[in-house]
Amino acid sequence: MGRLLKALVMTLLIMEITAIVDLTAVWTVLAEFHVPQTFVNIALAISVAGLAVLTAVVFRRAMRAERRLESEVDVIDWEDAPLSAPQPIMPVNATAPGQPRAVLPPNMQTFPQHPR
């Protein structure tokens, strides 16, 4: 999918949910106050205009995000990749995040068996 189509789909999904919530909230609040239907329709039209502006802003941000994601993609040529084993990922140290976690030797990874 192209960058434009990805940004458009993302924008439409976000704005569809936003429009449903916004228009329902406006109609509900005005209906609770027993406002005449003419004023309800005017308020809904103003909300739609605001949503159109918000849609333009969301689309621009989505395009910017897609451009950034596209520029960060690294293309790997698997024929030229070195044939080395993957490096082990060090577990996170929850007590001191800045320090590497001490890894136990392979024979100490499990709990010792107690004699019965």
Image (cartoon, grey):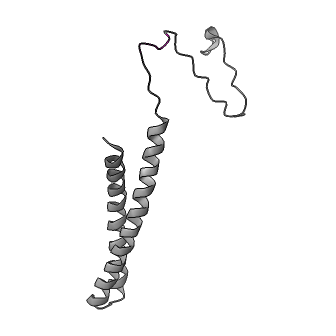
Residue 111 in the figure: left or right of residue 83: right
Task: Describe residue 11's horizontal placement relative to residue 111 as left or right.
Answer: left
Percent position (x, y) of residue 98?
72, 33
Q: Which residues are magenta?
A: 78-82
Please check the rendered image and state whether residue 104 is part of the magenta-colored stretch, yes or no: no
- Above or below — where is 115 with respect to 29? above
Report whether 98 appears left or right of 66: right
Q: Dividing the image into 4 quarters, which one contains the N terminus? A: top left
Quadrant the C terminus occupies: top right
* Residue 74 spot, x, y in % from top left: 47, 29
Question: To which quarter of the image does residue 114 belong?
Answer: top right
Residue closest to the eye, 116 or 95 = 95
Task: Examine the image and state in which quarter residue 14 appears.
Answer: bottom left
Residue pictured at 39% horizontal, 57% vertical: 59
Q: Where on the picture, by quarter, is residue 54?
A: bottom left
- Frontmost residue, 31 versus 49: 49
Q: Residue at x 61, y 25 (%)?
A: 91
Image location of residue 115, percent across then percent down? 63, 8
